[in-house]
Image (tube, grey):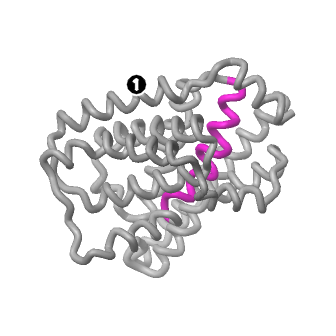
């Protein structure tokens, strides 16, 4: 992908993704003057779907248009469960570190055994599918120009803005504690970007994202200090594993042009 196409693609992705969820926010704002619109109402669920699918929609469109991928190839990558066992171990290593404090001093709060399965399937659609946009397209294109850390931080900023808009649509913005949430989001950015850089697997990012969402809902307790230390370790580990050698990046760029 040449420089003009790359910059145009990144601009279209951000304008499309943030613009779509921004318009949904405006519609929700106006609607709430008349009726309740949040995750408990049909209108709210429709708004959540329209806003939540924005990154996946624009990531798919631009992967097809600018990276010249077939739609079928994107779908195959999304459901590409056949990966090396070592790659799955990498995902579970990151998850183990991310929730280590809860493993030490917390617990799991579920009413019935199949609750995590239902939550996981839901998280694939309302969570994991975002990876088509943020890691599969946006950060991958950023890394054609910038280094791994800078690209991850840029993705974190855009992803953070998108999330706060999503929380507004969902009706949960008032209960979000910004500092812990943003640090957790930054950690997740490094986890998911490192997984993708090492494995080049969209599915593993989708799965990891969905599992993070599930565990965040069912895991309770744990020491906050241990959690912050573990997340610091995760970021360092992700930087070590996620950085690509210049010749590898050059080969990837050459394949796209």
Asked if residue 10 lies left or right of residue 152, the reply is right
Q: Position of residue 96 (x, y in %)?
A: 32, 44
Q: Is residue 154 above or below residue 96?
A: above
Q: Nearer the viewer, residue 61 or 69?
A: 69
Q: Residues within 10 Å of mark 1 (few under 14, many from 20)?
A: some
Q: Which residue is mark 1?
A: 236
Q: Position of residue 224 (x, y in %)?
A: 18, 39
Q: Residue at x 48, y 48 (%)?
A: 88
- Residues in magenta? 126-145
Q: Is residue 193 above or below residue 112?
A: above
Q: Is residue 236 above or below residue 199?
A: above
Disc 1 on helix, strand or loop? helix
Q: Is residue 249 above or below residue 70?
A: above
Asked if residue 185 lies left or right of residue 227, the reply is right
Q: Residue at x 49, y 56 (%)?
A: 207
Q: Residue at x 57, y 26 (%)?
A: 148
Look at the image and say whether residue 140 sits in the magenta stretch: yes
Q: Main secondary structure of the magenta part?
A: helix
Q: Position of residue 142 (x, y in %)?
A: 66, 32
Q: Nearer the viewer, residue 97 or 186?
A: 97
Q: Residue at x 41, y 28 (%)?
A: 237
């Amino acid at each position: 992908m040449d420089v003009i196409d790359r910059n145009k693609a990144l601009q279209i992705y951000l304008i499309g993704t943030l613009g779509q969820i921004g318009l949904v926010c405006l519609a929700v704002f106006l609607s709430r003057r008349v009726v309740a619109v949040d995750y408990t109402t049909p209108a709210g669920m429709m708004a959540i779907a329209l806003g939540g699918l924005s990154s996946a929609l624009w990531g798919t469109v631009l992967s097809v248009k600018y990276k010249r991928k077939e739609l079928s190839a994107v779908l195959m990558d999304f459901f590409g469960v056949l990966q090396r066992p070592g790659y799955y171990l990498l995902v579970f290593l990151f998850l183990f570190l991310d929730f280590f404090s809860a493993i030490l001093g917390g617990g799991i709060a579920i009413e019935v055994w199949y609750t995590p399965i239902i939550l996981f399937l839901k998280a694939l659609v309302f969570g994991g599918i975002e990876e088509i946009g943020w890691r599969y397209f946006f950060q991958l294109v950023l890394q054609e120009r910038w280094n791994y850390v800078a690209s991850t931080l840029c993705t974190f900023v855009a992803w953070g803005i998108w999330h706060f808009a999503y929380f507004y649509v969902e009706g949960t913005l008032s209960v979000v504690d910004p500092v812990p949430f943003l640090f957790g989001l930054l950690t997740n950015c490094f986890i998911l970007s490192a997984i993708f850089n090492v494995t080049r697997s969209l599915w593993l990012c989708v799965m990891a994202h969905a599992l993070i969402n599930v565990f965040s809902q069912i895991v309770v307790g744990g020491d906050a200090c241990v959690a912050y230390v573990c997340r610091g370790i995760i970021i360092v580990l992700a930087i070590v594993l996620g950085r690509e050698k210049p010749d590898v990046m050059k080969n990837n760029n050459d394949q796209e042009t």
